[in-house]
Image (cartoon, rainbow, N blue to C red):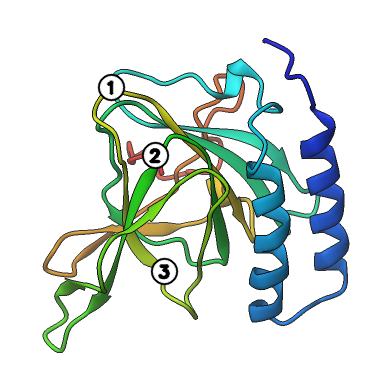
Amino acid sequence: MTQAAHPERLRAFIGALAELIDGHPREGDLLHRGGKLLAQLVSHDDWLPDEFARPDPERYQQFLLHADSRERFCIVSFVWGPGQSTPIHDHRVWGLIGMLRGAEFSQGFERGPDGRLVARGEPIQLVPGQVEAVSPKVGDIHQVSNAYSDQVSISIHVYGANIGAVRRAVYQPDGSEKLFISGYSNAFLPNIWDLSKEKSPAL
């Protein structure tokens, strides 16, 4: 693993976020203040080790960077190969997405009167230093894609749980859903939480 120049940036972010959560803020305040902390972290691209920034030619990767011992939050690096994207999916917990390298598009969805999913506004493009929030309260269903067809992009995601163990869903355009538990891409972290033994898409 290549050592990053400033690993203390991630340690400082973890400490500040844990302190924020210890104060039991309302979700809106948590997303606002936590978003500012994450924006500070992703405004510098000198702390993420290469081991957690490697793309895969077949699919995007999600590497666990930190899991709170009480599973109050986790931090994950999402590594997008050229042109890669997720299916439409949800999270079922609050989340913050900060762009570190490259750019990505996030297209929100909502249910129409007939239960089908319809796009909610225009896609949001995130560039380095920018942060977007998700949660069941502010909008939780979206599809994310690398904005580039010829380069890698990396975003840092923070979730209000151990997201690799959360049972959530991917969606078809008709609104039908399939439950899954994602686990993580880290080779030393097999998906021990999914007891269904059913191969699920990683998110």
Q: Residues within 10 Å of mark 1 (few under 14, many from 20)?
A: few
Amino acid under disc 1: Glu
| Disc with the residue nearer the chain's start (3 vs 1) | 1
| Disc with the residue nearer the chain's start (2 vs 1) | 1
Where does the image place residue 54, in percent across and percent down from the top left?
Answer: 49, 19
Q: Which residue lies under the disc numbered 3?
A: 140
Q: Which residue lies under the disc numbered 1?
A: 58
Q: Secondary structure at mark 1?
A: loop
Where does the image place residue 124, in percent across and percent down from the top left?
Answer: 35, 60
Amino acid under disc 2: Ala
Q: Quadrant of residue 111?
A: bottom left
C-alpha span from label 2 to label 1: 12 Å
Q: Secondary structure at mark 2?
A: loop
C-alpha span from label 3 to label 2: 17 Å
Amino acid under disc 3: Asp
Q: Which residue lies under the disc numbered 2?
A: 202
